[in-house]
Amino acid sequence: MPWRLLRPVVLVPAALVLTTIAASAEAGKSAGPSEFLLIVQIVLLIAVGRGLGEVMQRIGQPSVIGELLAGIILGPSLFGWIWPEAQTAIFPKTPEQKAMIDGIAQVGILLLLLLTGMETDLKLVRKVGRAAIAISIAGIVVPFACGFALGEFLPDALLPNPQERLVASLFMGTALSISSVKIVAVVVREMNFMRRNVGQIIVATAVIDDTIGWIIIAVIFSLASHGTLDLASVAKAVLGTLAFLAVSFTIGRRLVFLLIRWANDNLVSAAAVITVILLLMSVMALITHLIGVHTVLGAFVAGILVGESPILTRQIDERLRGLISSFFMPVFFGLAGLSADLSVLRDPNLLMLTGLLVVIASVGKFGGAFVGGTAGGLSYRESLALASGMNARGSTEVIIATIGLSIGVLSQNLFTMIVTMAIVTTMAMPPMLRAALARLPMNEEERERLEREEFEKRGFVANLERPLLAVDESVNAGFAAYIAGLIAGMRGLPITVLHIGERAKEQGKGRGEEESHEAVVKKAAETVSVKGDGDTGNVDVVTRARQAELGATIADEARKGFDLLVVGIDRVTATKDRFDRRIDDIAAAFEGPLAIVAAKGKHLKQPMPDALNILVPVSGSGVSKRGAEVAVALAQAGSGSLRVIYVATTRDKGAQRGASRGLSQETGILKDTSDLAARYDVDITTTLRVNRAPEAAILREIDTTDVDLVVMGVDRIQADHLSFGGVADAVLRQSKVSVLLVSSGEARQAPAERA
């Protein structure tokens, strides 16, 4: 390994010497708790943990292994063995000092479970749910039985309370049956198997394992708290847990979404949404504690609900994830490593028992998952990959072991054995899973699905999170609401309807219009009949009225994270080459993509048509492809037809270089659009026009076909007013049918005058 990678790790001993001298001096001054020592402990755990985590990642191992090893190196296993006085000075055993760092670790546990829940993809579980549930049951029952049996035969010396062996056996069964969804997901994603069929089943099974495991741990915690098998307390814990889960995934799901949206839209302080998320986690953790189960279940469920919220911008997610990964993870896992004294494994009996624990854990989980995969209809190779992935315990096992140690179910030696097992199984999993996945062939159906998903990942419509609809009281506003509803309904996106009409008009009929626009959006969303998850067509609509000048109102809304603004107002154009002043004001205040709607023809009498017959001009440019993508989505959602026109003129370089070469380029562009439509099962008709001005060809196509909507992808052109160029302006003004202009987010330089 290059020296530059090892340099931080090699420099750690020097840092240890300096901090040890300072810590010893501090320890000699006061016998009470010391903030100085707390900071020293945190600095060492973060520096060494993150450094070793970086090394582990570069050699193909999860970073959590490095953070665990950091604690082992800084603890009695190595540092305490080489220099016990220094190790004791930095990490004293006094209850007061230990309580300070333990408090941070306890918060770290909750935040880690919050992060794990946020990474839990329930849509994926629903998608492959039946197979994953069957596999998960077998993958839990077999190792649980093995762990329970091992707990029943453990020597009394390894149990803190031999008379409560049942609780310890249940705990061992749970510890051996659970998998680390985080480690599994990281390796599967790294191998580019996250969207493969077997990859989805592996991750979904790990999610189910994790969820069931935390529920069992919560019940065991209740048992341990009462000391005996009290049926009343167990029933209270089980019923309380079921009631908590039922309320969380019904009323709670909606409440979490509303709270996050309210914080995002109304609070102006820094990181307001993160504050709300942390408060939600804390409240749910307290609720689970009050019903007699562990707080980790509340934090885990809170993470799931937060992760499912449609309003969770990447910036918020990255901030929260960065805080947890860079601070709390190395501190918590470092402390877990500190608590594991590997020097006890010099005892041949304990070493043999640890090896037996690793074997039983591996054989039980591997065998159970393999049998479950085979019974669930997977092939031999797929079952092998599944079993390899499920055997990783990783961070989840360490959290469980830490809980077991804190509630007195595990002894110090048994805790060390379980942490050792977690390290060994986690380090063995990545190479085993990589080898198993590398041998899996891909069938044609899976290949087609992956190509479609890869395209969608880069697409515009597929990456929308939150559209904004700005409307007045006009008929055009009703048609714009219908278009926005179709777009939102494709993926169940929350949408905000902003009324920007004049205040005098709003006073007369504002409330009624708000309700009608909301109803139009919802009705349009409900008409979406595409194959998707359960959220398709189900949109949340919020209405707001303009409270200030138009530009200020739009700017205030823009800061809330909308990624598409659909505009539908009475007057779209003004004088030649100019949009209406209100359109100009809106565009100036919103820097993201715009969709400007101009209802014409039959849509003036029927703003909510039964179908849309769409014409989309294409040119091969990025913004043209965006327009084609929106057109395909609307054709699919609105159950209509789609015509694609490409105009090759003397302006095109391809046509200037020769007819054959030009036709090859044109055919390629039309084929790309046809492939796009095929991915969404939309039938299209393609048209090629040569040596004609684009605007003339588009207008002629409108006149000679039955289309009723033109969708054009257009670039904003830098000017003192909003402009999309001459072609878009001509089509917008002269078209007899409705027009939808979909613009890019940034303005570009106006092109040079062309012949």
Image (tube, rainbow, N blue to C red):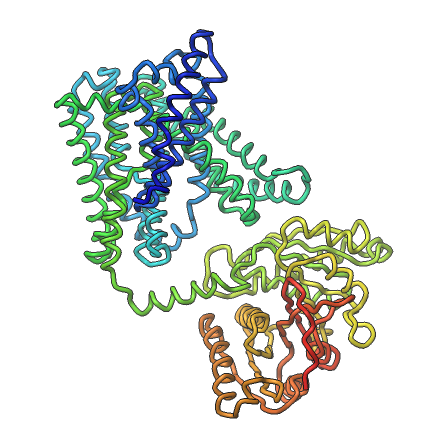
Q: Is residue 733 above or below residue 595?
A: below
Instruction: Pick whichever, 300 or 723, lies toward us.
Output: 723
Q: Is residue 282 above or below residue 611?
A: above
Whether residue 109 sits left or right of residue 744 in the image: it is: left
Whether residue 606 sits left or right of residue 212 in the image: it is: right
Give the image location of residue 502, x and y in percent.
83, 57
Would residue 220 be seen by someone viewing this image from the given angle?
Answer: no
Task: Tell me the quarter of the picture where residue 94 sits.
Answer: top left
Give the image location of residue 754, x and y in percent.
68, 83
* Residue at (66% x, 57% y) in the render: 468
Give the image location of residue 549, x and y in percent.
82, 53
Whether residue 470 sits left or right of residue 458 in the image: it is: right
Q: Is residue 736 above or below residue 629?
A: below
Give the position of the N terminus as an image quadrant: top left
Q: Is residue 743 above or below residue 16?
A: below
Give the position of the C terminus as an image quadrant: bottom right
Instruction: Pick whichever, 294 or 693, lies toward us.
Output: 693
Task: Tell me the quarter of the picture where residue 616 sits.
Answer: bottom right
Q: How many marks?
A: 0
Give the image location of residue 432, x and y in percent.
23, 48
Instruction: Pick whichever, 214 or 519, lies toward us.
Output: 214
Would residue 281 be seen by someone viewing this image from the given angle?
Answer: yes
* Residue at (30% x, 22% y) in the render: 79
